[in-house]
Image (tube, rainbow, N blue to C red):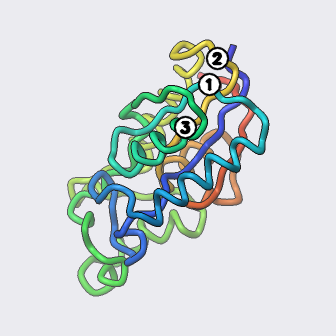
Amino acid sequence: MLRTVIAVPHALTAWNRINRIQGKSGPPLDDRGVIEARGKAAIITELKLGPQLVIASGLPRSDDTARTIAMVLRIPWQTDERLQECCFGSLEGCFEAELVKRYSSETVRSWENYHNGTFRYDFRSMDGEDDAAVRSRHLSLWRDLATITEVPTIILVGHGRGLNTLLHALGLTPPLLKRGDVRVIPYAPPDA
């Protein structure tokens, strides 16, 4: 029976280093990211929780992180697309510094609302997603975790906005989960 989830944002990519918006786009891990993923595996080992499965989002940076952690821990990994990052639509590939110059104040506010912890965002006008869609996907996965696996501890390797939207919906923020973090969460299905 599932009792513990270890939430892990993906490791570093070249786009992270230059503040380029990734969303459902973006490159795989760079060399520093692979080292960072190995470091996350070491932290997870030190927790002595004995995870038996890693679930990644299916996006390259999440899958690379999960694969690296799984190899170090010698456990299987699989993907579930519900764990994917928010789709930012036409913002994907832009530099964060460009937002103020190129987009409306409403778009900038949606971007900043996540960073200031309000978790209200809407990128549908740019063919992206809003917080309700991201929350719904992630909560659907959270509800199903106990049926996906019968092991007591799993690792979810996701993305910053997606994982934090989930944690917020579960009443588990602040603080924000950042890229280098590893967070242990007692598993309980959310109220329907």
| Residue drawn at x 38%, y 52% as measured from the top left | 61
> In the image, which disc is placed on residue 88?
none
Mark 3 sits on what residue? 156
Query: Is residue 192 toward the left or the right of residue 103 in the image?
Result: right
Residue type of the residue flagged with mark 3: Leu
The residues bearing labels 2 and 1 have C-alpha atoms spaced at a distance of: 6 Å
Residue type of the residue flagged with mark 1: Gln
Residue 12 position in % (x across, y down):
46, 63
Q: Nearer the viewer, residue 135 or 67?
A: 67
Assign a secondary structure to mark 3. strand
Residue 103 position in % (x across, y down):
26, 77
Residues at discs 2 and 1 in contact (Cβ within 8 Å): yes
> In the image, which disc is placed on residue 151?
2
Mark sitting earlier along the chain (2/1): 1
Q: Nearer the viewer, residue 113 or 162?
A: 162
Query: Is residue 186 toward the left or the right of residue 103 in the image?
Result: right
Assign a secondary structure to mark 2. loop
